[in-house]
Image: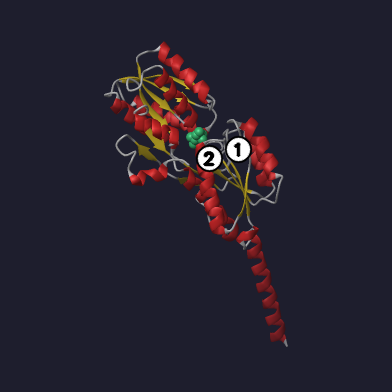
Amino acid sequence: MKKRIMVVFLTILCIAALALVLNGCKSSKSEELTVLFVPGVADPFYFTMERGVKEAAEKYGINLMIAEYPKSWGPEAQVPILEAAAAKGEIDLIITAPTSSDALIAPLKKFYDKGIEIITVDTKLGDGDYSKDSNYSFPLSFIGTDNKAGGVLIAKELGKMLGEKGKVYCMNTNPDTSSVVERGEGFKEGVDQLPNVELVGMDYCLDVQQKAQALTLAALQKDPEIGGIFGVNVFSAQGSYQAVVNAGLTGAVKIASWDATQTLIEALKKGEVDLVLAQKPAEMGFLAVEWGYKYLTNKTKVPKHISTGFEVFTQDNVNNPDMQQYIYQ
Ligand code: T6T
């Protein structure tokens, strides 16, 4: 009799332990998971990221919600979209590119406190080090490009194009967005390593192509010795190179651009742009969904930071078949 009571007791214990383990995972069935993707802005970079997000969601049978694309860059446009989209369903994970390192902390923390996991892609909260304790360390991971390394590389390449001497200018976008800030810092650092190259200015176009064009033109008029320009993202690069073309300075002013849009690749082929750095947005999106899925179904430990790398297009490799996959679409 005593033995039978013991067996019953042990069985109940085992069932309770199993229930506890299962409860630790949000869901054991992928169909139950809902992921919300909130892009940074309507541009080819995030459209390409969406492809990766969709591909992974299909692979893992995840219910995917895609928020409206903000028409301009910044928290004023992104936060209301995030809140409206998150109110539409029971969400397990939000994947987003915070358009400000500071201003997005509180809005995202609010959802995290409700039990929703967060992964930031492309841009980060605070300094992006989610492994140390802070008011912004709640996301599962930051998945994106090593923007600083890219900025240093661009300085080096632009330096080579200028014969290691001359003046360069940087068309940046926003002073409180981690990605572009780090590109600018990397560029400065790289130029500092070139004793005969001088960085004569860095302006912010707030992600408006027209403004980038006007600012670049003004910089060229102010300092006609500028021989190289770095455009740090889609709209700043597209605006800068257009300004150079309109000023009749194609070839005389070298252009290094960031983001492999069809427009910039075509310009590279025509010789209006000299270098295009391609990020891997589809990979960022895919990995964010995949790691979120692994965490939510199995509590798999997610790396706090995943670097997705980049590729560099030049006139020499732009037609190579193996490079075509890096063009945004
Ligand atoms: O360069 C990308 C992205 O990495 C950046 O954070 C914001 O601008 C883009 O979306 C391009 O427009």
Q: CA distance from mark 2 to mark 1?
A: 9 Å
Name the residue at 53% across, 35% down. 43
Q: Determine which residue is flagged by label 2.
A: 46
Mark 1 vs ligand 1: CB under 8 Å?
no
Per the image, label 1 sits on a secondary structure element best described as loop
- Asked if the residue under mark 1 is in contact with the one under mark 2, i.e. CB atoms within 8 Å, the reply is yes
Question: Which residue appears at 32% of the width and 20% of the height?
Answer: 252
Q: Please tell me in which quadrant of the rendered image residue 27 appears.
A: bottom right
Mark 2 close to ligand 1, CB under 8 Å = yes
Instruction: Please indicate whether residue 275 sits to the left or right of residue 285 in the image.
Output: left
Identified at 48% across, 32% down, the residue is 234
Picture coordinates of residue 135, whole percent (x, y): 61, 39
Name the kind of residue labelled 1 in the image: Tyr
Q: Residue furthest top?
A: 222
Assign the N terminus to one quadrant of the image: bottom right
Above or below — where is 4 with respect to 93? below
Report crowding for label 2: few under 14, some 14 to 19, many 20 or more residues within 10 A (C-alpha).
Answer: many
**Crowding near the residue tagged with mark 1, few <14, some 14–19, many ≥20 C-alpha atoms within 10 Å:** some
Q: Which of the two residues, 239 or 91, is positioned nearer the viewer here?
A: 239
Of the residues shown, which amino acid type is indicated by label 2?
Tyr
Residue 69 numbered tag: 1
- Residue 14 picture location, percent across and down: 65, 73
